[in-house]
Image (spheres, rainbow, N blue to C red):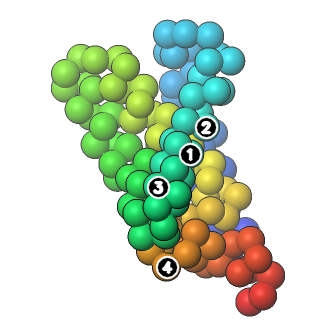
Amino acid sequence: MRNLLKLEEAAIFAGTLIAFYGAFPGDWWVFLLLLFAPDIGMIGYLDGPRLGAITYNLLHHRGIAVAIYFLGVYLENPVIVWIGVIIFLHSTLDRVFGYGLKYADSFQNTHLGPIGAAAREA
C-alpha cells in the first residue's frame, strides 16, 4: 500500500508540473531552486519540535498551498499563484519520498509514519 501511495503522489506531482509547464515566468533553474524553498520551515526546529512542526507544516500543507494558489488567482497576482504551486509541488514530492506532516513531539514522527532513525528502529 505504501508504494501505491507513493506512486499516486508521483502522478500528482507529474500532472501538476505538466499542467503548469511553460507558465512559469522565469528560468526553469530558478523554479527548481524555488522548489526547495518550503524547507525554510524547518528553521522553527531551532526552537524545538513544537514550533518546528508548526512552521514546517505551514509550508508543507497542500490545503494551504491550494488556498494560496486561489488567492493569487483571485488577486490576479502571478507571484502568489506560483507560491501556491511551488508549495503544492514541494509537498507532493516530499510525500513521494515518504516525508509527511510533522507531529509536535519529533521531526521523525510524521503522519505517514516514522522517518530516519525512528523508521529503522520500528
Observer-side mark, 3 or 2, equals 3
Name the mark on residue 77.
none
Is 93 situated above or below 51?
above
Say which quadrant the N terminus sits in: bottom right
Please report the residue visible at 78 percent of the width from the left and 88 percent of the height from the top. 121
Q: Residues within 10 Å of mark 3 (few under 14, many from 20)?
A: some
Query: Which of the labelled discs sits on residue 39, or is there none?
Result: 1
Q: Which residue is mark 2?
A: 36
Pointer 3: what residue? 44
Residue 26 showing in the rendered view? yes
The residue most toward the left is 74
In-image side of 87 versus 15 (left or right):
left
Q: Nearer the viewer, mark 2 or mark 4?
A: 4
Question: What kind of residue is marked 1?
Answer: Asp
Query: SS of the residue at dot 1?
Result: helix
Q: Is tag 2's residue or tag 4's residue first in the polypeptide sequence?
A: 2
Q: Amino acid at mark 3?
A: Gly
**Mark 3–mark 2 contact, CB under 8 Å?**
no
Q: Of 53 and 5, which appears nearest the observer?
A: 53
Per the model, the C-alpha gap separating discs 2 and 4 is: 24 Å
The residue lying toward the viewer, choosing from 25 and 115, is: 115
Q: Can you tell which mark lies on residue 105?
A: 4
Q: Secondary structure at mark 4?
A: loop
- Measure how far apart labels 1 and 3 are at the Cα level: 10 Å
**Label 4 sits on what residue type?**
Asp
